[in-house]
Amino acid sequence: MVFLLHLDSSAHRAGESTTRQLTGLFARHWLAGHRDAGYRYRDLAAEPVAPIGEAYCDLGRRVERHGTAFAGEQLIRTAAERREWNWTRELADEVLACDVLLLGAPMYNYSAPAALKAWIDRVSFPGVFHGPGGAPLLAGLRVVVVTACGGAYGPGTNAESRDFLTPYLRSYFVKQGVPAVNIEIVTADLTLAWLVPGREPQQPAAAAAFAAAQDRLIQLAESR
Ligand SMILES: Cc1cc2nc3c(=O)[nH]c(=O)nc-3n(C[C@H](O)[C@H](O)[C@H](O)COP(=O)(O)O)c2cc1C
């Protein structure tokens, strides 16, 4: 059975959140084409992942010392380490079990929201996405990231060099063993054109960006 893991991280939980609208669109279309699929939804803003603690670092450093092979379970020494490990294991298992990871990731201060970063730090425990000998366990995973930003950071824009969100997420998933060709990032930019006085002239471009993101996500959802 194929499995979709759907994560949203926008702190804006109302219906007009751009990333939430767009991840929802992808999920609906993908699930319509995969009627027997498993589906897990997490709202990382509503139910925040606990930031990693000292015991996570203690256990992680012990695992690093024993090499990269995954050995977290056997190396646990304290109740605090057990707690940290269980939180990590649950979230990492969801990633390992899914075929498609759908991620809503708005730009906050040029980068990822803290809610998403907490999830990333929590699941990226040493060795958890690599098997014996370092074989990547996420080599078959498909990742669809939906981003939104108030400004515009695309190629050729003045702000291009300040986009630390999309290069970061791409690098992160590649480092975890996801092939670069399996990572799709779809962006709806200029969203503040609808909110900030004076930005009305950007509204046609914002509407076009949103429509293009919708089209692309439907295409991706229906492609396989
Ligand atoms: C805390 C915070 C920081 C933001 N930082 C940026 C930023 O650095 N650049 C930008 O273009 N937009 C920024 N924005 C605007 C959001 O990226 C934009 O509103 C986007 O549509 C949010 O996604 P959402 O609609 O799914 O909530 C920021 C918004 C918030 C709440």
Image: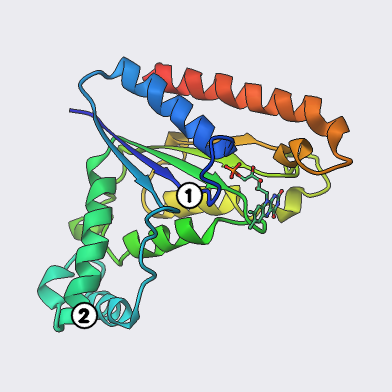
- Tell me if residue 158 can be seen: yes
Q: Amino acid at mark 1?
A: Ser
Where is 48 relative to 72, above or below?
Answer: above
Residue shown at 88% from the left, 31% from the top: 201
> Which residue bears the numbered disc 1?
9
How many numbered badges does the structure rendering display?
Answer: 2
Image position of 150 with respect to 53: above or below: above
Between residue 169 and residue 192, name the one nearer to us: 192
For residue 162, side relative to residue 224 (left or right):
right
**Of helix, strand and loop, which one carries label 2?**
helix
Location of the C terminus (image quadrant): top left
Amino acid type assigned to the residue bearing label 2 in the image: Ala
Q: Residue 138 falls in which quadrant of the image?
A: top left
| Local secondary structure at mark 1 | loop
| Residue sitting at the far front | 14
Residue drawn 53% across the image and 52% down it:
11
Tell me which corner region of the image, top left, top right, bottom left or bottom right, holds residue 100: top left
Expressed as whole percent of the image width and height from the top left, the position of residue 218 reads: 49, 19
The answer to which of 178 and 190 lies nearer the viewer is 190
The spot of residue 77 in percent (x, y) is 14, 83
Q: Which residue is mark 2?
A: 80
- Residue closest to the eye, 218 or 143: 218
